[in-house]
Amino acid sequence: MNENNRAQVLLKIFSPLIAIALALLIGAIFILIAGANPIAAYAALIQQSLFTFFGFGDTLKKMTPLLFTSLGVMIALRGGLFNIGGEGQIYLGALGSTLVGLYVSGLPTFIHIPLALLAGFIFGGIWGLIPGYLKAVRGVNEVIATLLLNYIAVNLISYLVQNPLEEANAPSPYSPLIAESARLPVIFSGGFVHAGILLALIAAIVTWVLLELTPLGYQIMAVGFNPTASRYARIPVKRTMILVMVLAGGLAGLAGASEVMGLKYRLFEQVSPGFGFDAIAIAFLSRGSTIAVVLISLFFGALQSGARAMQSVAGVPVTIVYAIQGLMVLFIAIALAVESWVKFSKPQT
């Protein structure tokens, strides 16, 4: 291994850790500027989010949609595509599971739950299929397509919950409750943790197996690395691109389904507070590692869960947590730029 290759490996391993450390360090400076003690603030965050029954439950609850969606973003990145449409795919997945939960009745739980989850996956997958087809067949940039589809999805759900799906006499826009047979079971009451977290972890295992141990995973990686060479190798590049976006959308759709089926039991106008965009940061920080996606999703869930504790204990504004998340993305982007420079620079002789 020459010096360039060694530097690339070390950057890939340590860049996420360095990005997180630097973001927390600058976050500590912000906390000092705000007139608070950063040690007390971070201690409150960790204590509340990981070492209290309710707080850890809340962390797992927030981790669930983040993990589903970031797995989808990671799969797309492996295929050389940048899916920033996770937010819209979450909304469509929530719609699919809501429709099955509302209008398919008389089914036992062991059939109704999988059917509602499948609907969430299909609806999210369709929302991923659209930019996948446009990219593969028409050459439309997937960043633009997925970004615009986010707005369409959000406004579509807004229209539906204010009109045909609106609960009668509702004080705010939301749908009626889904059937009890379509609700995910609560695995422990602390933080209302539902079975969606188990499904998300299973999805992570399946994703790892798919990407690392199957011919399809190799095919996805080959297309992402060099689509031109893949065509010469008789890999169906267009079909692979479309499939990648369908899988990415389907996983994000499961995030929306889990929010409806496990937490809210109805479709709200604001299905997601930005899980789709947080998932982009998680996927980039993971550097293509499924295990890292799981751990960083937990970390982001803990940040969001403990933010209120930082505010109440140390007097730190909640917005500092969002600043820390943004700084992580900035530093990982810098690391990627440095890695690209190392990759293409010639080793010294």
Image (cartoon, rainbow, N blue to C red):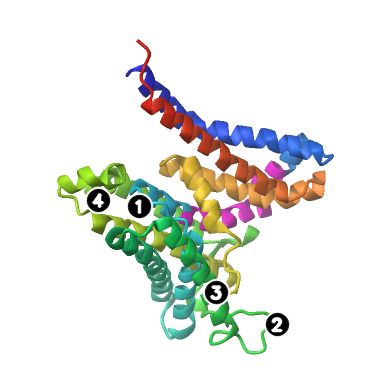
Sequence order check, earlier mark of 3 and 4: 3
Question: Residue drawn 69% across and 49% down?
Answer: 306
Q: Is residue 201 magenta?
A: no
Q: Amino acid at mark 2?
A: Pro
Nearer the observer: mark 1 or 4; the answer is 4
> Residue 17, image x and y in percent?
54, 33
> Quadrant where the C terminus lies?
top left
Disc 2 + disc 4, Cβ < 8 Å: no
Q: Which residue bears the numbered disc 3?
A: 155
Identify the secondary structure beneath mark 4.
Answer: helix
Q: Which residue bears the numbered disc 4?
A: 216
Disc 2 + disc 3, Cβ < 8 Å: no
Nearer the observer: mark 2 or 1; the answer is 2
Identify the secondary structure beneath mark 1.
Answer: helix
The residue stretch that appears in magenta: 45-69
State left or right for residue 87 relative to residue 31.
left
Q: Quick one: label 2, few (<14), some, or many (20+) residues within 10 Å?
A: few
> Quadrant where the N terminus lies?
top left
- How far apart, in angstroms, are the residues tagged by discs 2 and 3? 19 Å
Disc 3 + disc 4, Cβ < 8 Å: no
Q: Is residue 294 above or below residue 276?
A: above
Q: Which residue bears the numbered disc 1?
A: 206
Q: Quick one: label 3, few (<14), some, or many (20+) residues within 10 Å?
A: some
Q: Which residue bears the numbered disc 2?
A: 171
> Residue 249, image x and y in percent?
41, 62
Q: Amino acid at mark 3?
A: Asn
Sequence order check, earlier mark of 2 and 4: 2
- How far apart, in angstroms, are the residues tagged by discs 3 and 1? 32 Å
- How far apart, in angstroms, are the residues tagged by discs 1 and 4? 13 Å
